[in-house]
Image: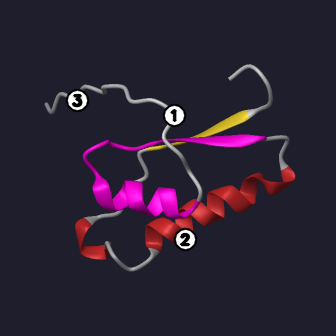
Amino acid sequence: MPDGVTWELAYLGIVPQRRRLGLGRALTLHALHALSDQPATRMLLCVDERNAPARKLYQSLGFTDLEWSEALLHFL
């Protein structure tokens, strides 16, 4: 994205016991509002494509699909 300044919000997570309380929406809106006085022109958000509830939330806040990539994780 060559034009403008992009900020990134990657893999925001809410513990299972606190999901569906509006916390993800509140945190995402807080991040967006925090950028209002910054030179940012857009926010890039990373979310697991299998996480349908999170994708629905982000789409309701105006985020659109840009691309999909694969992340790998190894538990020790």
Q: Is residue 52 magenta?
A: yes
Q: Residues within 10 Å of mark 1 (few under 14, many from 20)?
A: few
Q: Residues within 10 Å of mark 2 (few under 14, many from 20)?
A: few
Element type where label 3 sits in the image:
loop
Residue at figure coordinates x 35%, y 63% from the top left:
14
Query: Mark 1 is on which residue type?
Result: Leu
Q: Quadrant of residue 30?
A: bottom right
- The spot of residue 27 in percent (x, y) is 54, 64
Q: The C terminus lies in which quarter of the figure?
A: top left
- The mark nearer the N terminus, 1 or 3, is 1
Magenta residues (range):
41-61
- The spot of residue 31 in percent (x, y) is 64, 57
Please state if 70 lies on the left or on the right of 6 as rendered: left
> Please, which residue is most extreme toward the left here?
76
Element type where label 1 sits in the image:
loop
- The mark nearer the N terminus, 2 or 1, is 2
Kindly indicate whether the residue at mark 2 contacts the one at mark 3 (C-beta within 8 angstroms). Answer: no
Residue holding disc 3:
73
Query: Mark 3 is on which residue type?
Result: Leu
> Please, which residue is most extreme toward the bottom here?
21
Q: Disc 2 or disc 1, which is closer to the eye?
A: 1
Residue holding disc 2:
26
Q: Quadrant of residue 34?
A: bottom right
Kindly identify which numbered label has been placed on residue 11: none
Query: Mark 2 is on which residue type?
Result: Ala
